[in-house]
């Protein structure tokens, strides 16, 4: 069997590095043929020396122009600027595109991969939140449904990398699509799970960056602290699995071992478990439909484990309400929520916005936008820009 050729978009990030460790442990079944980095070029070159890809893409063209690339392996071609992502995502020499760039800047390359009928292993939830309606249209009947009929060649398909959605995808293979009563997304609750509403107003950047169970990039770590990450995941589940908002539930599970669940109409609940280690869901997407022994950590059943589940507190974590509302509204709402949040998180990290202002800023911008149920890509991109400007105004006020 010839190796699966993987383009790792966002190779220098947290998901990207975990993906490379999965690829390197795959005994040649997976091959990294393209790696991208935005600015961390020392790491990108070091990765290229190890994996000898056909391409490296340095997306920040200006910074790439100043960098010394003399250490790149002889057979590796350097592409500078974001257009390189779209080129490799659509190239005939690529089988699977791992979309692991952070934020809505990952959209163009994800759409290019879908347009070129690739298998997309999707970590970049923001592109689905922003452009869910368009991604679904582009996928057509081949959208991710959790069944093996997805396996025919020549069609684009989306395989979830996000651990919750990977869990749901796996648990959905236990019953028929119309036998699903609801999906239950688990959430760690983040670093402030037990904090009072009052103390949340005093949160510092360092406190918000210290996640209790997962080690991730800074943007998603802040999203986990506000629980906006779970809101984005509600919307992601809606588009991925074609589920209405009222069939999606969120439960707090501080240990992050039960990654999510599917409840069937007979009341049976199927869950997927594993230590909080992204290498397992990454491997599941890259190797699908096969299961192989890999580098992810395992649960040790000789030890005592205590798993807790508690209801989510929508008053202390109002981001969750936004998630349900946007999953229900669809259209332009996800794009506005996502862009407002990305920009508000940046403002928080720069000290221009309080932690407890992130979600109210998102709500007020969402409520003031002109909703459109069937937007074009141009409209979504325009709203993305508009929502970011609105956050700047809010942060300066
Ligand atoms: P990181 O911040 O660790 O990595 C982001 C990657 O994107 C890096 O390779 C970075 O390059 C690149 N990048 C940043 N800005 C741009 C840009 N403007 N254009 C092109 N590339 C850019 O993020 P994570 O790996 O944590 O997250 C990646 C995605 O996966 C996010 O969408 C996140 O929501 C999702 N995800 C992450 C999980 C995790 O465990 N980390 C879990 C579930 C989902 P460089 O570093 O070279 O500048
Ligand atoms: Mg997740």
Image: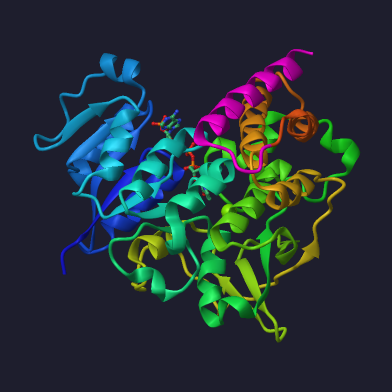
Answer left or right for 353 relative to 178: right
Could you say where residue 145 lies in the image, as x and y percent from the top left?
Answer: 50, 67
Q: Nearer the viewer, residue 329 or 254?
A: 329
Q: Is residue 128 magenta?
A: no
- Residue shown at the point (58%, 61%) measured from the top left: 164
Answer left or right for 371 relative to 292: right
Could you say where residue 30 lies in the image, as x and y percent from the top left?
Answer: 25, 59
Answer left or right for 390 relative to 156: right
Which of the 4 image quadrants contains residue 292?
A: bottom left
Q: Is residue 387 magenta?
A: yes
Q: Nearer the viewer, residue 72 or 173?
A: 173
Q: Which residues are magenta?
A: 372-397
- Residue shown at the point (70%, 22%) measured from the top left: 391
Answer left or right for 385 relative to 327: left
Q: Is residue 346 above or below residue 92?
A: above
- Residue shown at the point (56%, 48%) measured from the top left: 133
Which of the 4 image quadrants contains residue 309?
A: bottom right
Q: Is residue 381 above or below residue 393?
A: below
- Is residue 1 at all visible to an observer of this figure? yes
Q: Is residue 76 above or below residue 230?
A: above
């Amino acid at each position: 069997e010839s190796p699966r050729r993987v383009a790792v978009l966002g190779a220098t990030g947290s998901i990207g590095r975990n993906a490379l460790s999965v690829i390197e442990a795959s005994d040649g079944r997976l091959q990294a043929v393209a790696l991208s980095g935005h600015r961390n070029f020392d790491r990108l070159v070091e990765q290229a020396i190890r994996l000898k890809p056909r391409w490296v893409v340095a997306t920040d063209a200006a910074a790439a122009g100043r960098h010394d690339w003399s250490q790149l392996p002889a057979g590796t071609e350097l592409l500078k600027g974001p257009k390189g992502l779209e080129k490799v995502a659509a190239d005939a020499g690529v089988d699977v595109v791992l979309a692991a760039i952070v934020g809505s800047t990952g959209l163009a390359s994800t759409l290019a991969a879908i347009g070129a009928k690739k298998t997309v292993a999707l970590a970049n939830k923001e592109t689905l939140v922003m452009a869910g309606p368009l991604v679904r249209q582009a996928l057509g009947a081949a959208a991710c449904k959790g069944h093996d009929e997805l396996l025919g060649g020549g069609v684009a398909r989306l395989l979830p990398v996000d651990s919750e959605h990977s869990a749901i995808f796996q648990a959905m293979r236990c019953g028929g699509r119309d036998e699903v009563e609801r999906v239950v997304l688990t959430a760690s609750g983040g670093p402030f799970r037990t904090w009072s509403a009052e103390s949340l107003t005093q949160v510092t950047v360092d406190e918000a960056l210290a996640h209790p169970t997962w080690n991730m990039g800074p943007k998603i770590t802040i999203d986990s602290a506000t629980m906006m990450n779970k809101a984005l995941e509600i919307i992601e589940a809606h588009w991925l699995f074609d589920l209405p908002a009222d069939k999606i539930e969120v439960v707090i599970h501080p240990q992050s071992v039960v990654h999510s669940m599917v409840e069937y109409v007979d009341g049976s609940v199927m869950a997927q478990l594993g230590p909080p280690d992204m290498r397992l869901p990454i491997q599941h997407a890259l190797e699908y439909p096969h299961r192989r022994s890999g580098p992810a950590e395992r649960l040790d059943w000789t030890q005592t484990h205590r798993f807790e589940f508690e209801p989510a507190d929508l008053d202390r974590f109002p981001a969750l309400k936004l998630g349900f509302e946007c999953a229900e509204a669809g259209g332009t709402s996800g794009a506005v929520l996502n862009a407002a949040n990305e920009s508000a998180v940046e403002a928080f990290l720069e000290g221009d916005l309080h932690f407890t202002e992130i979600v109210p800023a998102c709500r007020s911008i969402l409520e003031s936008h002109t909703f459109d149920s069937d937007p074009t890509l141009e409209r979504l991109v325009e709203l993305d820009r508009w929502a970011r400007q609105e956050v700047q105004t809010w942060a300066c006020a």
